[in-house]
């Protein structure tokens, strides 16, 4: 029987790489790429995001309090993001209809919005529970809910998302690409990159908007993007393959910048993502992660600029 589609969990932080059959890895990578392409298409034209720093931090703290795996916290954020976007879109649709009617119905819309806000913490807890498949945590950082309230909230989320909550997370893409890099002879060990990738992935989630805003400004070469440019950029925020290569490239530079060009070449060959795009994302991540100069660490903006220069010379 073939091995699992993703690296085996040994304990809370250690994974084993290089134990899965090559054919299985190729099939799994293709499947992830197809899922990613579909997610990017579905995100086109969508407005709004709930991956704010305070929300993500709440999910991370709750997951840590419950001793959950890192993958659970990422998946909980993605479930919450999709659920809240659907809820917000539903309220906006109702508002559009009610604005054509009378003030009484407009007041009803305001009531729905308040209910959504009042239940936000409950929805967040439910998303973490759904992601972790836990059922008996009633208290979350001072908020107390009955078992019935939690079950009803979970059912609301499941129905809203058509029971499609087994969502791929950026971590799945990172770990799959690390597995492939190991088979391709990457000079930096996958286990060494993995730990740094987890740290940077946490950072990207916590600083989601600032990092993607800087990426948007870099892509259009303008410090003040228009609303239309921002809306078109939303699909980029859902491109987990792009996020994964950016995370790995930045991690490789931090671990061993002399091997960075080789890692970049492997990532470009595996995913088909351009070298310049990978370097731009690495630039954005590095400028938000390496905030001080140390004798061992290059100046952030110079390091990132070197990444982009190297990418341009390799194209």
Image: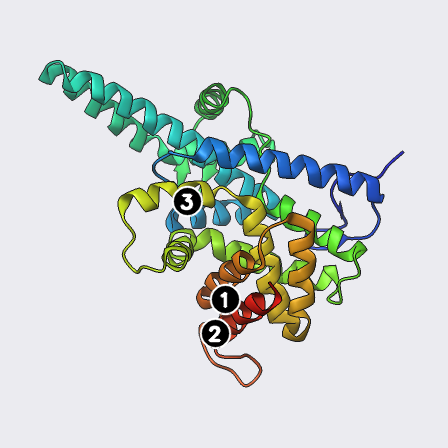
Q: Is residue 119 visible?
A: yes
Q: Which residue is mark 1?
A: 286
* Screen quadrant of the N terminus: top right
- Residue 19, placed above or below residue 82: below
* Pair 2/3: label in front: 2
**Quick one: 170 or 125, which is closer to the camera?**
170
Q: Report the residue at 55% width, 28% height from top.
A: 165
* Pair 3/1: label in front: 1
Instruction: Decide: few, some or many residues near mark 3? Use Cα within 10 Å; few <14, some 14-19, many ≥20.
Output: some
* Screen quadrant of the C terminus: bottom right
Indicate the quadrant where residue 45 lies: top left
User: What separation in Å lies between label 2 and label 1 (alpha carbons)?
Assistant: 6 Å
User: What separation in Å lies between label 2 and label 3 (alpha carbons)?
Assistant: 25 Å
Q: Report the residue at 63% width, 39% height from top.
A: 33
Q: Is residue 69 visible?
A: no
**Quick one: 304 or 58, which is closer to the camera?**
304
Decide which of tag 3 and tag 1 comes sooner along the chain: 3
Dot 3: element: loop
Decide which of tag 2 and tag 3 comes sooner along the chain: 3
């Amino acid at each position: 029987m073939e091995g699992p589609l993703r690296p085996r969990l040994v304990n809370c932080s250690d994974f084993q790489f290089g134990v899965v059959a090559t054919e299985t890895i190729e099939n799994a990578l293709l499947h992830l790429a197809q899922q990613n392409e579909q997610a990017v298409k579905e995100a086109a034209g969508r407005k709004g995001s709930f991956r704010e720093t305070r929300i993500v931090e709440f999910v991370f703290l709750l997951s840590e309090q419950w001793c959950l795996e890192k993958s659970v916290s990422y998946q909980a954020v993605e479930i919450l993001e999709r659920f809240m976007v659907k809820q917000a879109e539903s309220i906006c649709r109702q508002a559009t209809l009610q604005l054509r009617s009378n003030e009484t119905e407009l007041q009803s819309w305001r009531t729905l919005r308040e209910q959504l806000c009042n239940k936000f913490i409950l929805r967040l807890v439910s998303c973490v529970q759904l992601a972790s498949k836990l059922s008996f945590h009633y208290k979350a950082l001072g908020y107390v809910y009955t078992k019935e309230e939690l079950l009803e909230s979970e059912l609301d989320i499941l129905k809203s998302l058509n029971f499609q909550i087994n969502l791929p997370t950026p971590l799945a893409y990172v770990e799959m690409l690390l597995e492939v890099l190991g088979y391709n002879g990457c000079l930096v060990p996958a286990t060494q990159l993995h730990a740094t990738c987890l740290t940077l992935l946490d950072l990207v989630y916590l600083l989601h908007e600032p990092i993607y805003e800087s990426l948007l400004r870099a892509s259009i070469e303008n410090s003040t993007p228009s609303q239309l440019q921002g809306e078109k950029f939303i699909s980029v925020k859902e491109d987990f393959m792009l996020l994964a290569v950016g995370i790995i490239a930045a991690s490789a530079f931090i671990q061993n910048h002399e091997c960075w060009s080789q890692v970049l070449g492997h990532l470009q060959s595996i995913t088909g993502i351009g070298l310049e795009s990978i370097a731009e994302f690495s630039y954005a991540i590095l400028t938000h992660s390496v905030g001080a100069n140390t004798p061992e660490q290059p100046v952030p903006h110079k390091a990132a600029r070197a990444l982009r220069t190297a990418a341009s010379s390799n194209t």
